[in-house]
């Protein structure tokens, strides 16, 4: 395996690998299909990250993990949050192994520490070695230790942007359950248009105007997602947001084919 | 949680948490009982490590993981070995959570690298923070990246000795399915006697004489285990080997009560 090959960072949103509205319910057919699309794309080097969807979020919310350590009663909630994320991760890994992909889970909380919710320490030694040997490291949003908060939630999006930056990724592919960024919320405004391509400068302009005019679709946590991803774009790494709940779109994006979605470039 | 409290390192052997002779078969009643004994001991600070038993070993052997990376065909075996160890770990964690113990899995391979099978790099940042917040970090024997071999197997015993040393443990409790070290193999020699206490010097003498006279019981991988643990004893950390397949023995050992077993001291 050529170590100079730039990895493609693929983030599978929680919405495409779980039934988001039903707690602890994986979307196995979708996970299997995405595993197949990634296998068929035959990329030289991949880092995979997935979200928590209906596994991580309900437990983390119940015990207010993102807010940090306040009472000893939260400790068992932290344990449980870690545990459900590993349960979901196991299902993802099982599915990818069935596609004969050499995926290897790397528990984010074992090698990262955050400070005020931002990655402060990331030991990527294992990931580096895995990439060199041709493995696909798989990470996920996790409950992690935090220097200020005690503990908190580290999102898969932040991990994706950080690893894309560290390993100078070829590009980042963000697989979600919507077509991409819109000029307005497509559910309330039938005139909302999908943004096919946008530069960082244009995007920042849109984000600044959100509070006043809501000129960009910020539903489904898209604004938070974009904010997490921007640092990687600033380093020159292109982002493709793609609707992975529609068969074939992830595959085509990975192959560099033209597909419905939003491309974010440094411009 | 007082950060100056010395943690007790507890290693649960694969033989007491799985049905060793039946592949991928956990010993759930035993895991549950051990979780209860540890909960009832109410220790201030614990690091837990468990072995692979009938989960890790069959897969690791099939793909010759311990020998290192030789062919791309081994990669999927490495993936599978990691996966079965996480499956076993999940069962252990589930059981301990049911005892309301704030256990948190820390994937060893995400924060360690070995060189020729020996730990070369161990990022203990997460473990340190977990102990400070009163959590019980749980690690396990794992398939890990190796600077010389590509990958290999890192034993739970080596992890236990390393963490006991790093965190200056109160003591190490090694839970196995035999009573301890014997003067000879108790299965073939009815005159074999259990060694209640032995100093490092005496132990080294016995180990040196093994090849000629087999004067110490080296069945069940006990010799390899002892060799892994000795570095911690050299640093002054006492080891209690105890038969955890007999109810109450682990509990009593944790409470410092007198119990059948072998104590190894620096002397």
Image: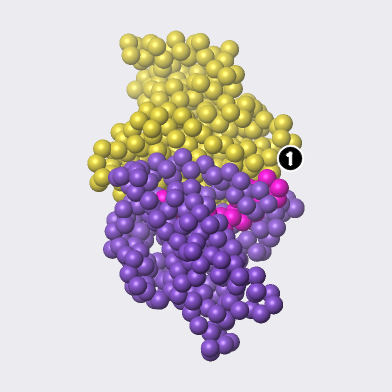
Chain colours: A yellow, B purple
In the rendered view, tell whether residue B263 sits above or below residue A242.
Answer: below
Task: State which chain disc 1 sits on.
Answer: A
Q: Position of residue B235 (x, y in %)?
A: 51, 54
In the rendered view, tell whether residue A23 sits above or below residue B229.
Answer: above
The answer to whether residue A66 is seen in the rendering is no
Residue drawn at point x = 58 percent, y = 12 percent:
A267
Which quadrant holds residue B73? bottom right
Task: Examine the structure image and report whether residue B142 is included in the region drawn in magenta.
Answer: yes
Q: Position of residue A50 (x, y in %)?
A: 49, 39
Q: Position of residue A102 (x, y in %)?
A: 63, 48
Task: Examine the structure image and report whether residue B90 is included in the region drawn in magenta.
Answer: no
- Disc 1: which residue: A1
Residue numbers of the magenta segment: B137-160
The answer to whether residue B34 is seen in the rendering is yes
In the rendered view, tell whether residue B257 sits above or below residue B149.
Answer: below
For this rendering, which residue is in front, B59 or A223?
B59
């Amino acid at each position: 395996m050529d170590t100079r090959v730039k990895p493609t960072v693929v983030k599978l949103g929680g919405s495409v690998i779980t039934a988001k509205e039903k707690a602890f319910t994986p979307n196995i057919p979708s996970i299997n299909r995405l595993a197949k699309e990634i296998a068929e794309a035959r990329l030289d080097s991949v880092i995979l990250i997935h979200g928590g969807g209906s596994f991580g979020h309900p437990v983390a919310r119940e015990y207010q993990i993102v807010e940090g350590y306040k009472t000893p009663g939260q400790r068992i909630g932290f344990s449980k949050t870690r545990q459900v994320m590993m349960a979901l991760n196991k299902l993802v890994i099982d599915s990818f192994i069935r596609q004969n992909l050499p995926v290897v889970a790397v528990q984010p909380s074992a090698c990262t520490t955050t400070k005020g919710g931002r990655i402060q320490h990331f030991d990527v030694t294992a990931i580096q070695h895995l990439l060199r040997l041709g493995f696909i490291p798989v990470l996920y949003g996790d409950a992690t230790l935090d220097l200020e908060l005690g503990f908190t939630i580290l999102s898969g999006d932040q991990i994706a942007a950080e690893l894309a930056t560290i390993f100078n990724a070829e590009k980042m592919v963000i697989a979600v359950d919507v077509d991409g960024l819109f000029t307005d919320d497509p559910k309330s405004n039938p005139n909302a248009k999908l943004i096919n391509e946008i530069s960082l400068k244009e995007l920042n302009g849109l984000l600044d105007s959100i509070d006043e005019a809501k000129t960009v679709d910020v539903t489904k946590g898209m604004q938070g997602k974009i904010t997490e991803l921007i640092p990687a774009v600033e380093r020159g790494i292109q982002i493709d947001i793609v609707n992975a709940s529609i068969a074939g779109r992830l595959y085509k994006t990975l192959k560099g084919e033209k597909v419905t979605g939003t491309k974010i470039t440094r411009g």
